[in-house]
């Protein structure tokens, strides 16, 4: 299979869906002539023109409102929010409109919008440009929240998100755009479900439940742990809501130990939510308390060493695993 | 001239009597709703439209059935004027399964896909950006429908007003923005909230034509909206209409309106009641006699009584309806729900 970047995989998904369905269009800040802040939409203006590749003013509430309103009358928008940090300016429309209409209006309407945006830190963007708010949105009934980690997953899930009749928060990561991976040739049709996780590495001693960029850090940690005889299973959630609880509990039944690893803040977030679900649904299968690797509980600092200290590392994952896996695990 | 041939503002007698009927129907519907609220049959907030009937009825009468309306939380009147069944609107207020939103929405969330009344938006100003999006969808598909966005004087202070109007003007979207300026956003007088006296400079800021109209004059509102719809339909972009009106009741049923005087209220009610103004005009023009007015009022009363009886007799939603329509696939927060936690051997 050919190898392409996460960015190119996203662009292919958008292009294929726009070719497939005239109702699909994209809108956002600087997505046309500029090609997208992270170049995801580069070149699409040439193929699809201004009608379907809409540059908007810097006004997140009306960007989201335009996507939602146009979806109400029959279109299928892909709405790029420049970064997840700015999604707070659109959050009223996302939470109070997109997530509510299907239910609040008795099933009479649907809101098939994809809100695409990168989040996360690691590129020295400072406190206001390095955040993940996936747990804020995943808290809300009526939204789907997905965070693919690989080019293959990104393409397959974005195509599904466009075809989905519910609003989908499609959360990317600034540092994933250049990550490469195997993806079928352009035009070779495949889609992936929006409610299924994926075991990225099999293991017997501990399950690393993770998502987005941390999947790659966990895979690296697992390689190092393997050298010491500890076989970690890396479970990529891919979807935060709905969460694939089935896959998580199955893995816990096998390994009996869990570390949840995420880039965001520790308290009241995705990881604690997952840990609570595991305690609720698979407590009997746990042989140790659930470990939790997170970003530090501070606004993201700019200075490189401080930023690196604030982000969860491979060493943090390894330490968390060793804290709950007995030294003799390998001999078990 | 025979009475059946009498006209006003280019409308037929039948059309004129229908405008009167719509306004009285809404007035009586709202009075019945207030009564039901005090009896505990309606819960939550209840924002009545009494006093503002001419604005909504006049505006919506200028639309085609295929045009869209998106409104605020004070929208019962708009829903009825757009053709929604009073039965379905009242049942929604009662929280019944037969309500327009199956009892899931309530007073602030009327919706009809069929009649193209797209909410019932209870976040102040939200409908201004949603209307822009609906207008964009219409423009994208090259249809000739338009969107009428109805909102109050409080909404124009929200960021959504500015973001929405700027984009609508920039992209020449087929939207008519109608502000029903009833002088108060809850208890906040317009004079205390607006840095300018009218919406004219705000419309000018986005290059949008501005029209001020007497919101108590149903024909004047209709005419202003008609002109604006023509502009919108022909690709000319949005218009901002400010209709000066007054709500005769408090902000909601819970509001004793201590921020304004009883004298002010009685002045409006005695001299500026839009229904009485229109009745006098109809009689003066020879369009209606007392008997016509009486017959119309009685017909409205019957429809309202029927709606209330229907709501009374309708069942509440089944408990199982709780999880319906959250997401289309019903997955909710967790993709798997049915497998119970099994104990470890």
Image (spheres, rainbow, N blue to C red):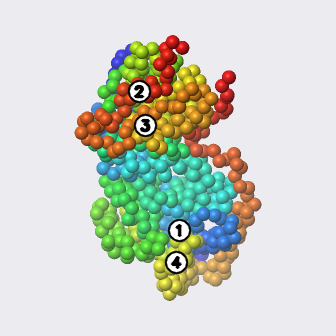
Chain designation of label 2: A
Number of residues whose C-alpha sits closer than 10 Å to that of mark 4, classed few (under 14), some (14–19) or many (20 or more): some
**Same subunit: marks 2 and 1:** no
Number of residues whose C-alpha sits closer than 10 Å to that of mark 2, classed few (under 14), some (14–19) or many (20 or more): some
Q: Residue at x 55, y 74 (%)?
A: B255
Q: x, y (%) of residue B79?
A: 57, 61
Along the line of sight, the residue nearer the viewer: A254 or A82: A254
Distance (Cα) linking label 4 and label 2: 63 Å
Quadrant in which residue A40 is drawn: top left
- Direction front: furthest residue: A327
Along the line of sight, the residue nearer the viewer: B103 or A181: A181
Is residue B108 visible from the viewing direction of this image? yes
- The reply to whether the C-beta atoms of the residues labelled 4 and 1 are less than 8 Å apart is no
Numbered disc 3: secondary structure: strand
Would you name the residue on which mark 2 appears? Answer: A319
Quadrant in which residue A256 is drawn: top right
Chain designation of label 1: B
Q: Which mark is residue A170?
A: 3
Would you name the residue on which mark 4 appears? Answer: B257
Answer above or below: position of B48 versus B343. below
Q: x, y (%) of residue B194?
A: 35, 71
- The reply to whether the C-beta atoms of the residues labelled 3 and 1 are less than 8 Å apart is no
Q: Disc 4 or 1, which lies upstream in sequence?
A: 1
Would you name the residue on which mark 1 appears? Answer: B57
Distance (Cα) linking label 4 and label 3: 46 Å
Along the line of sight, the residue nearer the viewer: B321 or B254: B254
Distance (Cα) linking label 2 and label 1: 69 Å
């Amino acid at each position: 299979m050919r190898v392409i970047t996460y960015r190119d995989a996203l662009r292919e998904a958008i292009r294929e869906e726009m070719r497939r369905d005239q109702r699909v269009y994209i809108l956002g800040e600087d997505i046309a002539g500029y090609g997208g802040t992270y170049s995801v939409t580069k070149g699409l203006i040439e193929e699809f023109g201004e009608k379907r590749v809409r540059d908007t003013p810097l006004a997140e509430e009306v960007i989201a409102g335009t996507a939602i309103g146009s979806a109400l009358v029959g279109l299928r928008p892909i709405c790029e929010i420049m970064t997840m940090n700015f999604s707070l300016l659109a959050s009223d429309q996302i939470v109070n409109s997109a997530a509510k209409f299907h239910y609040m209006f008795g099933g009479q309407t649907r809101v098939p919008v994809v809100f695409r945006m990168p989040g996360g830190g690691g590129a020295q963007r400072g406190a206001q440009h390095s955040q993940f708010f996936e747990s804020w949105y995943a808290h809300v009934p009526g939204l789907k929240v997905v965070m693919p980690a690989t080019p293959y997953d990104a393409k397959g899930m974005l195509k599904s998100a466009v075809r989905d009749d519910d609003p989908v928060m499609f959360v990317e990561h600034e540092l994933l755009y250049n990550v490469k991976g195997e993806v079928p040739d352009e035009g070779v049709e495949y889609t992936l479900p929006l409610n299924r996780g994926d075991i990225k590495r099999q293991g017997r001693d501990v399950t690393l439940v993770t998502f987005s960029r941390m999947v790659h850090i966990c895979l690296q940690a697992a390689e190092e742990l393997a050298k010491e005889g500890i076989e970690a299973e890396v479970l990529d959630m891919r979807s935060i809501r709905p969460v694939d609880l089935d896959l998580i509990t199955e893995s816990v039944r096998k390994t009996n130990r869990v570390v949840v690893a995420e880039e965001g803040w520790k308290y009241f977030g995705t990881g604690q939510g997952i840990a609570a679900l595991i305690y609720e649904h698979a407590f009997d299968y746990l042989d140790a308390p659930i470990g939790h690797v997170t970003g530090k509980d501070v606004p993201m600092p700019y200075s490189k060493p401080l930023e690196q200290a604030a982000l969860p590392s491979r060493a943090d994952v390894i330490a968390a695993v060793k804290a709950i896996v007995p030294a003799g695990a390998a001999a078990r | 001239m025979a009475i059946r041939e009498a006209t006003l503002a280019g409308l037929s007698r039948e059309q004129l009597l229908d405008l009167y009927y719509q306004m009285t129907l809404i007035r009586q519907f709202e009075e019945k709703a207030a009564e039901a609220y005090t009896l505990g049959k309606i819960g939550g907030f209840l924002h009545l439209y009494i006093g503002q009937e001419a604005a909504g009825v006049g505006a919506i009468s200028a639309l085609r059935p295929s045009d869209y309306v998106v409104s605020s939380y004070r929208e019962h009147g708009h829903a009825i004027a757009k053709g929604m069944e009073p039965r379905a609107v009242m049942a929604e207020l009662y929280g019944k399964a037969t309500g327009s939103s199956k009892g899931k929405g309530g007073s602030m969330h009327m919706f009809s896909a069929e009649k193209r009344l797209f909410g019932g938006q209870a976040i102040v100003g939200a409908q201004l950006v949603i209307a822009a999006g609906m207008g964009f969808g219409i423009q994208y598909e090259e249809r000739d429908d338009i969107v009428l966005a109805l909102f109050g004087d409080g909404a124009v202070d929200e960021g959504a007003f500015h973001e929405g109007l700027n984009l609508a003007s920039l992209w020449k979207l087929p939207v008519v923005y109608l502000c029903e300026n009833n002088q108060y956003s809850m208890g906040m007088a317009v004079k205390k909230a607006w840095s300018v006296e009218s919406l004219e400079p705000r419309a000018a800021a986005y290059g949008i034509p501005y029209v001020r109209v007497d919101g108590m004059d149903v024909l004047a509102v209709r005419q202003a909206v008609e002109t604006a719809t023509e502009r919108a339909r022909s690709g000319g972009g949005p218009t901002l209409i400010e209709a000066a009106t007054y709500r005769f009741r408090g902000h909601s049923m819970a509001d004793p309106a201590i921020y304004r005087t009883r004298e002010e209220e009685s002045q409006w009610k005695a001299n500026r009641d839009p229904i009485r103004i229109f009745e006098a005009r109809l009689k003066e023009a020879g369009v209606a006699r007392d008997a016509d007015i009486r017959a119309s009022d009685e017909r409205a009363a019957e429809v309202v009584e029927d709606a209330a009886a229907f709501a009374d007799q309708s069942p509440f939603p089944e408990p199982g309806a709780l999880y319906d329509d959250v997401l289309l696939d019903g997955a909710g927060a967790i993709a798997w729900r049915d497998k119970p936690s099994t104990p470890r051997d």
